[in-house]
Image (cartoon, rainbow, N blue to C red):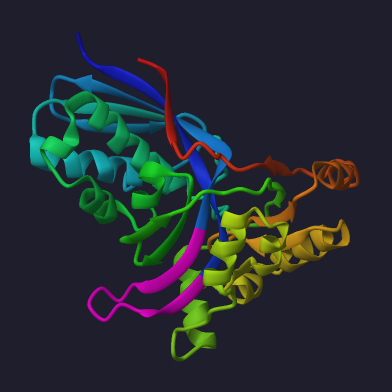
Amino acid sequence: MAKSIRLRAFGKVNLSLNITGKNSKSGLHELDSVMMSADVFDTVTVTERADGEIRVTFTNADIGQNNTAYKAAKAVHGVIGGCGYDIVVEKGIPVGAGLGGSSADGAAVLRALDLFYRLPDKLDMRATALSVGSDVPFMLTGGLARVRGTGEDLFFIENKISLFAIGLMSESVSTAAAYSAFDNLHSDCKLCPTDNDKLCSLLLAGDGEAVRLFGNALYEPAVKLCPTVKYNAELLKSLGATVNLTGSGSMVLGYFTDIQKFAEAVSKLDGKRYYALAPVKTGILHEWIER
């Protein structure tokens, strides 16, 4: 009987995103970012197929075949061979938000195939994840971590504060375009709006003042590419939130440490579409629904 598993793949938010330069070999921007798993998820089903082909289907989104779920399956298949896979992704993470949906899908495929075949006996999981995408090593585990370099340097920490966030979407912002705009603004390819040493210390201490240190070096480029980002940020500030962009956008998040103030802010949105997010504190990114 063909093996099959259905997983929830949770998205992430960037509490901070510092850009520390460019990698001289790969040309990729190097980051110093604090990432946290959030309770928005895609549902990913992976099923073996006998003919060796890899097929990925998105049930509610128009995403091409050059996607991270396919790359993850291809990376594993290239090492272990054998049967192929049918992969079905039900999108719950909005596309183009900066919530890491693509990386979550790729990590979910790796986790599914690990449950099938005990992948660490056959390949380096962390290196394989990094070859699929820079956020995939974090998404493979989830929780809360400081992520540096091009995704290879991870330090996981415990989150001891309660966070509640309102997410507002704008038009999609291309990640490549955001980094290109950043380089046009900063010739040295560096901007570090956040003291991540202090931020991690406050998170570990359970100190709500941590939200004051949230920041994102891509905020200004995102605003240049999509002025609605600034409009949404100002709206959330007017509701008493601490505001931060996640990833390269376009989702802007308004954070609260008090659930009552969060609820009051939601009540004032007057029917505007929003996403309500809270941390996934378990440190387990993928939970299987059906096996």
Q: Which residues are magenta?
A: 18-34
- The percent position of residue 118, horizontal first and vertical second, equals 18, 30
Q: Is residue 221 visible?
A: yes
Q: Is residue 244 left or right of residue 151?
A: right
Quadrant position of the C terminus in the picture: top left
Quadrant where the N terminus sits is: top left
User: Residue 283 placed where, x, y %?
Assistant: 46, 40
In the displayed structure image, the side of residue 50 where residue 233 appears, left or right: right
Image quadrant where residue 85 sits? top left
- Seen at 57% across and 49% down, the residue is 159
Q: Residue furthest top?
A: 1
What residue sits 89% from the left and 44% below the top? 264
| For residue 186, above or below residue 119 | below
- Does 261 sit above or below residue 92? below
Closer to the camera, 203 or 272? 203
The reply, left or right, for residue 291 in relation to residue 246 is left
Within the magenta stretch, is there residue 60?
no
Which residue reaches farthest bottom? 187
Q: Which residue corresponds to the image point at 53% horizontal and 70% vertical from the top-left?
A: 196
Q: Can residue 91 be seen here?
A: no
